[in-house]
């Protein structure tokens, strides 16, 4: 019943007489058979673009698959339905497995000196409701969303105005648009390929009904009331949100589309009949018909996964669950793979250089203190005790998988050397101790550091327990404060933390053409300098300017990266920033290249045995194209 009810609404705008349906059904998903027979859906040749994106599955070392099946996965909250837009990874341009940019939704793109970008759409490409995708969808978003001061009061995303001004936008023809800046914007294409991409188009034919410019005021008021929105712009934003696809009626370009309105305990995503990719045999992707997302308490996701209640699980589980999953393989039809995590550090400590406590602020801004804290940690013990020796002891920096990797970045101030740590702390004016051997601050307080964490992984507690012992030996007392993620983030952004424990750099495998913004104060949720980050994020209207020379240098270098004319120049800037960041120990990395379990049904095919795993830039499973995963016919959910 789910299939019939949801697809009937989806295909309402694509009604065709029965004779128009293609006779060759070999490449048609059985899931769509009823609508094809009833003439409620065009045949495949009319659903696909004239030149669809052809994915050579065999060339990827995989097996071309069969249609069908439902795949279950478990999420921790309703917000996590965003994983489907990350896993699906349909982007104007996107990365392949080698992290090379290529056209995806676009048929082609050109860039002239990173200042003029021309995008050509695929002729005949359609939204999931069957309506044509054209340059008018870019025009709508540009003219009626970005330039509308009520919908976009801030003047547009910073990525669109890296030098202060928005680009020039042109519609060249029905399938071609152009964005032009006077100065280079090398981050434009990477941000379009990001896990949470910059949005520059939307289904105008659908969204106009929620826009004041196009909708009758009485009908608009009724829609606002129906959707519990106080302002028309709130209504439009709610109905247009694509990254977290809560609106089942919103036309999409993803391989699967949501059919479930929140609130719900289960969200069903079904195949997009107009998806633009096919395999080498002309079979439309995705192979899998439905993705079913079941909400569960985060704490029991590993247990449910090990009990075979998930057919594909990459989030909500961690390395400490690995032995449990391997044992579960003997009892349930599941398989566990280990992928390498791409973060700069699986766990990292972030001393808050913007601490509201003036004494602690001065202490943490002293690079000798940060280096001493790093040297006092026995990373080998952490690696062996927590990660079974499978991780790599490293600063919070790029991995060897990145072309920007240098051993000196990874080894900066990570040797376990308590004697040098003690000497540095003494030199920093922290030589006095109390009867318990704890160092004293300049105002007589004990050097007691509270490390805050959302406590979402047992690994965090295990690591902090070891660090507590390591720091105690050099006269630093460590205390742990655990709070819910929202509260934790609020305290970070307000500068109320002293030190935080979190993941390291999101992107540990960058190329020179990916933005190094993570290395500089650029966002208010960066735990080591949230107020400096707010200053950058708000265009110098909020927060405070960096007054530490090395931090200011990173911001300056980031600006130079944004105007560099070549990949070679950008690489040189990357190296300068990496050297500064690691030498200054702006974050204390511990272990990277750790392994992430990927659990999937033993019936599922084409899941890589080994791969890189992370949010950015691999989009968790995204660059490995889950639309090419498929289920054997004997799968119980098929």
Image (cartoon, helix red, strand yellow):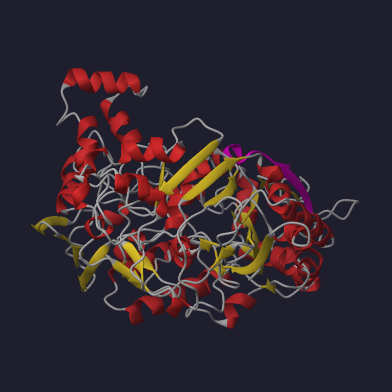
In the figure, residue 327 lies in which quadrant?
A: bottom right
Point out residue 480 in the picture as x, y percentages from the top left corner.
74, 46
Q: Is residue 206 left or right of residue 609?
A: left
Name the one closer to the observer, 24 or 434.
24
* Residue appearing at x 78%, y 63% in the figure: 386
Q: Is residue 43 left or right of residue 632?
A: left
Q: Is residue 189 left or right of residue 98?
A: left
Name the one closer to the observer, 109 or 603.
603
Point out residue 26 in the picture as x, y percentages from the top left corner.
36, 63
Point out residue 436 in the picture as x, y percentages from the top left corner.
90, 52
Residue 224 is inside the magenta segment: no
The residue at the far right in this view is: 435
Q: Is residue 491 left or right of residue 380?
A: left
* Residue appearing at x 23%, y 23% in the figure: 220
User: What range of the chain is rendered magenta?
Assistant: 477-487
Labels in figure, total: 0
* Residue appearing at x 45%, y 73% in the figure: 97
The residue at the far left in this view is: 173
**From what the image shows, is residue 630 above or below residue 526?**
below
**From what the image shows, is residue 86 above or below residue 283?**
above
Name the one closer to the observer, 269 or 369.
269
Residue 424 appears in view? yes
Residue 617 appears in view? no
**From what the image shows, is residue 362 above or below residue 268?**
below
Point out residue 11 in the picture as x, y percentages from the top left corner.
28, 41
Name the one closer to the observer, 437 or 233.
233
């Amino acid at each position: 019943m789910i299939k019939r009810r949801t697809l009937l609404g989806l295909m309402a705008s694509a009604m065709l007489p029965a004779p128009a349906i293609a006779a060759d059904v070999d490449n048609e998903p059985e899931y769509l058979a009823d609508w094809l027979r009833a003439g409620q859906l065009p045949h495949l040749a009319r659903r696909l673009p004239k030149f669809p994106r052809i994915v050579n599955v065999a060339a990827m070392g995989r097996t071309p698959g069969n249609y069908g099946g439902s795949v279950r996965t478990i999420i921790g909250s309703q917000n996590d339905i965003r994983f489907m837009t990350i896993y699906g990874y349909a982007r104007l341009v996107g990365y392949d497995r080698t992290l090379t940019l290529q056209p995806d939704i676009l048929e082609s793109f050109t860039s002239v000196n990173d200042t003029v970008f021309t995008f050509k759409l695929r002729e005949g490409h359609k939204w999931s409701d069957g309506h044509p995708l054209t340059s008018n969808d870019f025009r709508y978003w540009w003219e009626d969303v970005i330039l509308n001061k009520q919908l976009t009061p801030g003047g547009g995303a910073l990525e669109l105005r890296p030098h202060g001004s928005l680009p020039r936008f042109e519609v060249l023809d029905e399938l071609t648009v152009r964005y032009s800046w006077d100065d280079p914007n090398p981050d434009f294409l990477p941000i379009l390929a990001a896990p949470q991409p910059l949005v520059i188009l939307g289904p105008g034919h659908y969204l106009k009904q929620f826009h004041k410019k196009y909708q009758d005021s009485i009908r608009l008021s009724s829609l606002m009331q129906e959707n519990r929105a106080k302002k028309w712009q709130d209504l439009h934003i709610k109905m247009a949100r694509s990254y977290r696809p809560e609106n089942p009626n919103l036309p999409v370009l993803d391989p699967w589309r949501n059919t479930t309105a929140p609130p719900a305990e289960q969200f069903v995503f079904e195949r997009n009949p107009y998806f633009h990719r096919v395999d080498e045999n002309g079979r439309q992707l995705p192979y899998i018909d439905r993705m079913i997302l079941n909400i569960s308490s985060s704490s029991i996701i590993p247990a449910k996964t090990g009990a075979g209640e998930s057919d594909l699980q990459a989030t909500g589980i961690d390395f400490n669950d690995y032995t449990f999953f391997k044992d579960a393989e003997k009892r349930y039809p599941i398989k566990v793979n280990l992928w390498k995590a791409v973060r700069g550090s699986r766990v990292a400590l972030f001393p808050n250089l913007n601490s509201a406590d003036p004494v602690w602020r001065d202490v943490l801004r002293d690079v000798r203190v940060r280096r001493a804290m790093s040297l006092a940690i026995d990373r080998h013990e952490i690696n062996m005790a927590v990660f079974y020796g499978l991780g790599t002891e490293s600063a919070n920096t790029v991995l060897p998988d990145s072309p920007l990797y240098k051993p000196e970045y990874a080894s900066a101030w990570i040797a376990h050397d308590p004697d040098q740590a003690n000497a540095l702390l003494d030199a920093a004016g922290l030589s006095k101790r109390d009867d318990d051997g704890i160092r004293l601050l300049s105002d007589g307080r004990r050097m007691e550091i509270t490390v805050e964490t959302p406590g979402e992984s047992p690994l965090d507690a295990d690591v902090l327990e070891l660090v507590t012992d390591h720091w105690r030996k050099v006269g630093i007392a460590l205390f742990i404060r655990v709070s819910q993620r929202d509260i934790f983030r609020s305290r970070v952004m307000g500068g109320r933390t002293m030190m935080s424990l979190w993941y390291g750099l999101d992107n540990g495998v960058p190329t020179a053409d990916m933005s190094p913004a993570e290395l500089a104060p650029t966002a208010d949720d960066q735990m080591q300098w949230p107020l400096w980050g707010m200053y950058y994020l708000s265009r110098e209207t909020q927060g405070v300017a960096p007054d530490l020379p090395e931090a200011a240098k990173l911001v300056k270098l980031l600006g130079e990266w944004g105007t560099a004319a070549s990949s070679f120049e950008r690489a040189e800037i990357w190296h300068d920033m990496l050297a500064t960041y690691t030498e200054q120990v702006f974050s204390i990395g511990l272990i990277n290249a750790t392994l992430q379990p990927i659990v999937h049904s033993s019936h599922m095919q084409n899941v890589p045995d080994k791969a890189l795993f992370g949010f950015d830039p691999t989009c968790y499973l995204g660059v490995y194209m889950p639309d090419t995963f498929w289920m054997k016919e004997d799968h119980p959910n098929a």
